Image (cartoon, rainbow, N blue to C red):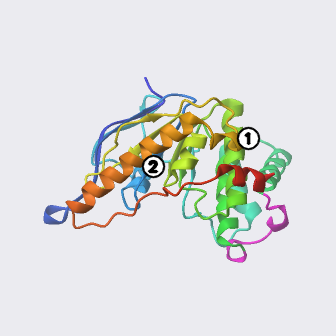
Amino acid sequence: MAYLELNNVTKTYGSGNNVTEVLDNINLHIEEGEFVAIVGFTGSGKTTLVNLINGLQKPTSGEVLFKGKPVEDTSHERGVIFQNYSLLPWLTVYQNIEMAVKEAFPKESKGFIDKRIKEYVEMVSLSHAINKRPKELSGGMRQRVSVARALSMDPEMIIMDEPLGALDALTRGNLQDEILNIWNKNKRTALLITNDVDEGIYMADRIIPLRPGPNATLGPEFKIDIERPRDKTALNDNPEYKKTRNAIIEYLMDIGSERSSNSEFNYELPDLEPKDLRWEFRASK
């Protein structure tokens, strides 16, 4: 039994003649402690997939199981880092994270909660803004609060919906490493939704493309056979990295061309630009 299972999941919106099938026959099994990345096109249904896994939405058909039990609702066992921050605007940075920590650790002392909040605020370099409200923060700072809030709950599974896309290269590189460090300490199960192929290869054990919808479904998996911990300074010269990256990009470009020529929809490809990860490593030092 896998830690997370999606079995024959379909998700539709609307009714009658106005039904839109967003996801079709999604089958995904993630083992405990595994780090999986799903890479896909803009508008392909990635966020809908996250909402199903987190219990914010229910599948039209099929089942979503977490530790063998149906996912019926949200739970702090599955910590989500949302793409759109999802912060409460009337609360400060401290208070937004405090709500999450109290939910996850209801029996702990005020001292424990205070220390944990400050630890995770410091982790995302926002100690100077701990008493500010979201409207006083930049978009990147709000996203860092979202990261800190999710990780502070010590979830059994971390679900990330393109969490670092709005960040500059320095901050993005730092948070990639922080998330990996936390994952590596206790091997929390992790699912990363991203449109950045390089990010997926750097962080994940395997990458699975999401074919564009309507009727979006998962494509073949690509295993990342690169030893951990991965060194950004050496990754660009790693033949396995080059081989895997080229295979994923070729697949994505092929299905993008196929769907664009046979559909009225326009699809925006994931980030396929070549990157020198060594620059990102130097910036984060």
- Circle 2 sits on which residue? 39
User: Is 159 on the left or on the right of 100, as rendered?
Assistant: left
Residue 278 vs residue 69, the one in the foreground: 278
Residue 107, numbered label: 1
User: Is 112 on the left or on the right of 9, as rendered?
Assistant: right
Res 106 visible? no
User: Is 70 on the left or on the right of 172, as rendered?
Assistant: left
x, y percent for residue 282: 77, 52
x, y percent for residue 139: 64, 70
x, y percent for residue 149: 67, 54
Residue name at image x 64 percent, y 72 percent: 89
Q: Is residue 163 above or below residue 154?
A: below
Quarter holding residue 172: bottom right
Residue 167 vs residue 183, the one in the foreground: 167
Q: What residue type is labelled 1?
A: Lys
Q: What residue type is labelled 2?
A: Val
**Of helix, strand and loop, which one carries label 2?**
strand
Categorize mark 2 by other alpha carbons within 10 Å: few (<14), some (14-19), many (20+): many
x, y percent for residue 184: 68, 33
Res 27 visible? yes
Q: Do the residues labelled 2 and 1 touch (CB within 8 Å)?
A: no
Part of the protein shown in magenta = 125-136
Sequence-wise first label, 2 or 1 = 2
